[in-house]
Amino acid sequence: MINVLFVTPIDEEHKKLFSDIENVNIRFIDRNDVTDEDIQNAEVILGGMPMSRLQNCEKLRWLQLDWAGANTHKDLPEQIVLTNASGAYGTAISEHMLGCVLMVMKNLANYIEVQRNHDSTNLGSVNTLTASTVLSVGMGDIGSSFAKKMHALGAKVYGVRRSVHDVPDYVEGMYTMENMDEILPECDVVALSLPETVETVHLFNEERLRKIKKGAILVNVGRGTAIVTEDLLRVVKDGHFAGVCLDVTDPEPLPRNHPLWNMEHVYLTPHISGRFNAAVTFDKVLQIFHDNLERYVAGKPLNNIVDKSIGY
């Protein structure tokens, strides 16, 4: 019998999804209530636990995260297989990204202020997606979902990934992080959905931020560390961007007295584009859990295995 510790919050109805899996003893315990003994007795943990709680877990053989980013757990011992929930978040987060782009492009945030002033001022011309060039930096589930939406709405879309091995039919061309500076000056929208790795930390410093087309929209939903915050402050202060939409920041959470809060044309959300705020995301996470647990019991290779040497 395989001892499985399920730590992602789940209701009674959703627990029934796992009733068809044999040869497992599943204990459903909210991660906030898990004891050290619970962890040490588990062969499998479904859901994220802090690395600080995973020391001396001699029986643990597989940790399935309920989020996509896995850099926080790349130092797990070799004998513990690490899998993530990549594929569950693309729908919800890409819609958030689309909303951010349209909010800035159509002046919607500024029109809220116009309304508050009981004014009828026309704020002037706006761009359209059909006349826009979009760069999706990161072409995993989230970045690809965003690129598909932008393409479907008429934008000219380019992608950036670690290596170029194919070019999907919904993008015009693909770049790597080494040569993406060639396309940055042409882009009306630059959207980041990168994991945190050695290659991505501080990828967008002041020099690269200024290479982006003046008047462009910058969106970041990956990791806050992809952008050098102090550099971003300087570039934004110069009026370089039409809007900067950040669902992630560095530091995170952002201190209450941080200057980013009050920067003009900066729009902040508290890392909520994903999580389980959309029911479809939670359902997809549970499906990944279920399918992988069936595979584990049957001795089959797991899906979504993280390469711990690079963190995703």
Image (cartoon, rainbow, N blue to C red):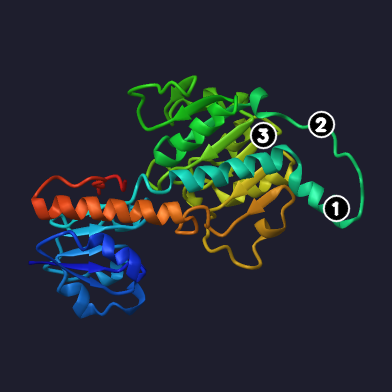
Give the amino acid at mark 1: Gln
Vertical comparison of 73 with 40: above or below: above
* Pointer 1 residue: 115
Residue drawn at x 60%, y 56% is: 269
For mark 3, give the secondary structure.
loop
Q: Is residue 74 visible?
A: no
Vertical comparison of 1 with 232: above or below: below
* Pointer 2 residue: 125
Q: Is residue 165 visible?
A: yes
Q: Is residue 281 left or right of residue 4?
A: right
Q: CA distance from mark 2 to mark 1?
A: 18 Å
* Pointer 3 residue: 216
Q: Residues within 10 Å of mark 1 (few under 14, many from 20)?
A: few
Residue drawn at x 29%, y 44% is: 310
| Mark 3 vs 2, N-terminal side | 2
* Residue in front for this viewpoint, 82 or 119: 119
